[in-house]
């Protein structure tokens, strides 16, 4: 079982097969952390959207997945890293219902709604890192 002490697992994202691998890894961590089936599905759906965004908009990159604990509860943290063009209009990208039309249609705002914590760090010309956490209830 993955634990925070073992450190994160990393998966390169350079093609569609890698998006599937990220989904599988996130599902494994969610199951081993004993997230409910509904929360597993939410986290895997968000991870799929974010992995696809990393591939399509960031030109590829990598995902890191790990079990985390805040002392009261355990959960799964997944982060998605790219060195692409960055997000020029963060307000628009995070607007409810906005999607470029290339992903699952969730967009960043949809992925954000599916998780308990959502952090986005981006800079034009530097790339983007999106980190999400889903906590066990």
Image (spheres, rainbow, N blue to C red):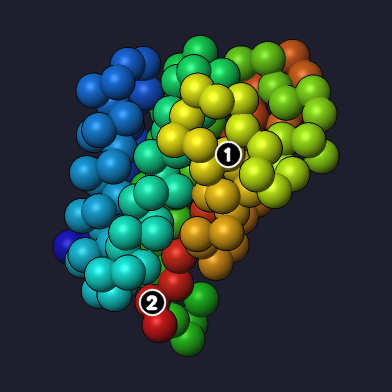
Gap in angstroms between the C-alphas marked 1 and 2: 24 Å
At which x and y percent is residue 77?
45, 56
Q: State which quadrant residue 23 falls in.
A: top left
Q: 82 or 19: nearer the eye?
A: 19
Q: To which residue does mark 2 refer?
A: 136
Q: Is residue 49 left or right of residue 92?
A: left
Q: Nearer the viewer, mark 1 or mark 2?
A: 1
Q: Which mark is residue 6?
A: none
Q: Earlier in the sequence, mark 1 or mark 2?
A: 1
Q: Is residue 72 visible?
A: yes
Q: Residue at x 65, y 44 (%)?
A: 97
Q: Is residue 77 left or right of residue 95?
A: left
Q: To which residue does mark 1 refer?
A: 107
At which x and y percent is residue 40?
31, 63
The C terminus sits in image quarter? bottom left
At which x and y percent is residue 50?
48, 37
Q: Is residue 8 visible?
A: no
Q: 71 or 116: nearer the eye?
A: 116
Q: Residues within 10 Å of mark 1 (few under 14, many from 20)?
A: many
């Amino acid at each position: 079982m993955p634990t925070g002490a073992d450190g994160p697992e990393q998966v390169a994202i350079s093609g569609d097969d890698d998006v599937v691998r990220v989904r599988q890894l996130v599902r494994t961590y969610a199951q081993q952390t004993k997230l409910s089936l509904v929360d597993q599905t939410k986290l895997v759906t968000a991870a799929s959207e974010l992995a696809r965004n990393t591939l399509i908009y960031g030109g590829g990159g990598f995902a890191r997945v790990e079990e985390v604990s805040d002392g009261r509860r355990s959960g799964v943290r997944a982060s998605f890293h790219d060195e692409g063009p960055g997000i020029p209009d963060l307000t628009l990208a995070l607007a409810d219902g906005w999607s470029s039309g290339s992903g699952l249609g969730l967009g960043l705002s949809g992925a954000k709604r599916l998780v308990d914590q959502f952090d986005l760090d981006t800079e034009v010309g530097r790339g983007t890192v999106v980190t999400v956490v889903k906590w066990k209830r």
